[in-house]
Image (cartoon, rainbow, N blue to C red):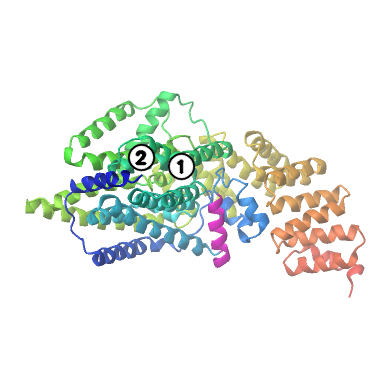
Amino acid sequence: MTPARPAVRRGARYAAARRPATGTQNPSLQWQILFLIVAGAFAVHANGLGNGFIYFDDPEGVVDNVSIREFSGANIGHWFTTPLQFMYTPLVYVSYAIDFLFGHGAIGMYHFTNLILHLANVVLVFLLFRRLTERAFLACFVATAFAIHPVNADTVAWISARSNLLATLFSLAALLVYLRYIGSQRWQPLAWSVVLFGLAALSKSTAVALPLVLFLVDHVQGRRPNRRLFLEKMPFLVVAAITVLVALNVRQDVIPQHGYTVADRVLLTCSALVNHLVQAIFPFRLSLAYEYPHTPFPWYLYLLPFALAAGTAALLLVRRARGIVVFGLGFFAVTIAPTQAVLLIDGYHANRYAYLPYLGLFLIAGHFADTALRHPDRRLRVGAIGATAVFVILFATLTVIRNTAWQNTETIMSDAIAKEPGVAFTYNSRGIARFRDGNHTGATSDFERTVALDPDFVLAHHYLGLIKYHDRDYTGALGELDYEVSRLPTFPAAYSERGKTKIALGDYSGAYADLSTAIAYDPQLAEAYYSRGVAGIALGNPRGAISDLNAAIGLIPQYADAYYQRGVAESRLGDTGAACADWNAAVSLGNPDANRSLTDDRCAG
């Protein structure tokens, strides 16, 4: 144990000795610069604080998520046992619940938390790369690029990207503590690093890449591969294995796109990587989603693997930068790999996928900028300063502009449709926003366009069913919802809406069965309890109905219709006093049907 310490330190010093001596060595000045970076990041992203919800994931995660409205044993149990949008991310539930606790559902609170998490990540990025490279300028460069890069605007501006922010926060913290372990060789920092990695995994499953990053860190720190090096990674690998198993079990929105073969998938991955690399330098025409390439692929797609190999080889030929290049490209490849493991509805390539991986590219760019600034040729130094300043101003401006696209669902989806008109879910999300605004004509047009692009897009059928239900076309609504259930048999809202539709068609037994299924899948679904209460009354089970309506009111205390129906059930049981009290409550909450019940002689006086 004792002899190992000097070896590690010698390796670290040797790695540091090969790096150019850094300016900005004054610790006080470094903290002042970091403060300016954080303040600049806040200024660049601040115009997104007034943005609204986005009707893609935000409704299920926040807007309609009753469980986040109260810290209770039942809700906490729900967070840790129920996937959120087909992902096991219990800490995201917790963060949303904290937002609701302090903001009482205000949209600005969720956006503010996203921004604060991003700023915290900026600080951790600086601390990590300052400790990892022992080069203050390089740490400042990477933190600045990370803070203001336009591609990262999507992660900060979208409330449902909270999982990305939290997973990055805990992953960066785990790496920092791991570096402390390397320096001390004490087990406590290693244990804390494992705990932080576990928290990252509870935030988002893509954090599983961290154990591989640790090996890259070992390489930079001059640690030679040995038995101990692998044994100390075992707890991380166990957490990663559990995370993968859980993720595969709950992930049900994975879709086979266009019948891709294994070779096609390789080309898709290369295409995604090239797109990310280009956008790191040229972040224009950014979109929320990018259209899947259709087979047969265009000819240039087959050249991308060779382009990636040639670019990597060219960077590795720069001998003095080889260590940085190996770590930077390795970090980028390892952390972005989990996003390529499955094909999702919102694309094989998305801006938020690059939030953490871009740190590897920023490190390489920062190294070359630092090298140029130290070059004896004054013109090269001046050029490097000018280029860095231009990129900072340009990226900051583009990020401010990008935040305006995230103003609301209509703006971000219309922006995406204008740039990538072949992506089904963008029409669907805009349709949801229009549906909620009461624009059923516009919504129907968007949902029909969604189905035209992807006939198997089940959520479009869900909302087409809602619109037909609203238009009293109950048979048509049932057809849409039947198809949805057949394609997504574990989606609670589908059973809830189909149960409600069956009530309208007079099939109370079928409705009761569907609503029971919905509740089994999601015990927090207030509307399912309400509708099952209505079906219970119709089936002659007022006591069971009261139990269900109590549950609905417990989840939504201002549920006017539930008070009215509970009054009906109590009336059936002869409990006039309770019925009249509930009808009065329903009237005060805005239910017009309760007025008629209150005119009954039993409630007179």
Q: Is residue 348 above or below residue 115?
A: above
Q: Nearer the viewer, residue 300 or 356?
A: 356
Residue tagged 1: 236
Q: Quadrant of the N terminus?
A: top left
Asked where in the image residue 230 lies, by quadrant, the reply is top left
Q: Quadrant of the C terminus?
A: bottom right
- Please provide percent x and percent y for residue 115: 42, 60
Q: Earlier in the sequence, mark 2 or mark 1?
A: 2
Image mark for residue 119: none
Q: Residue at x 68, y 52 (%)?
A: 524
Question: Is residue 284 shown to the viewer in this render?
Answer: no
Asked if the magenta segment contains residue 29, the reply would be no
Q: How many marks?
A: 2
* Secondary structure beneath label 1: helix
- Please provide percent x and percent y for residue 222: 27, 42
Badge 2 crowding class, 10 Å Cα cut-off, few under 14, some 14 to 19, many 20 or more, is some
Residue tagged 2: 215
Badge 1 crowding class, 10 Å Cα cut-off, few under 14, some 14 to 19, many 20 or more, is many
- Please provide percent x and percent y for residue 514: 74, 42
Q: Residue at x 48, y 28 (%)?
A: 258
Q: Identify residue type, mark 1.
A: Phe
Please report the bounds of the magenta region as a residue range: 90-105
* Main SS category, magenta section: helix
Q: Residue at x 40, y 57 (%)?
A: 118
Asked if the magenta segment contains residue 100, the reply would be yes
* Secondary structure beneath label 2: helix
Q: CA distance from mark 2 to mark 1?
A: 12 Å
Q: Identify residue type, mark 2.
A: Phe
Q: Is residue 344 above or below residue 120?
A: above
Q: Residue furthest bottom?
A: 605
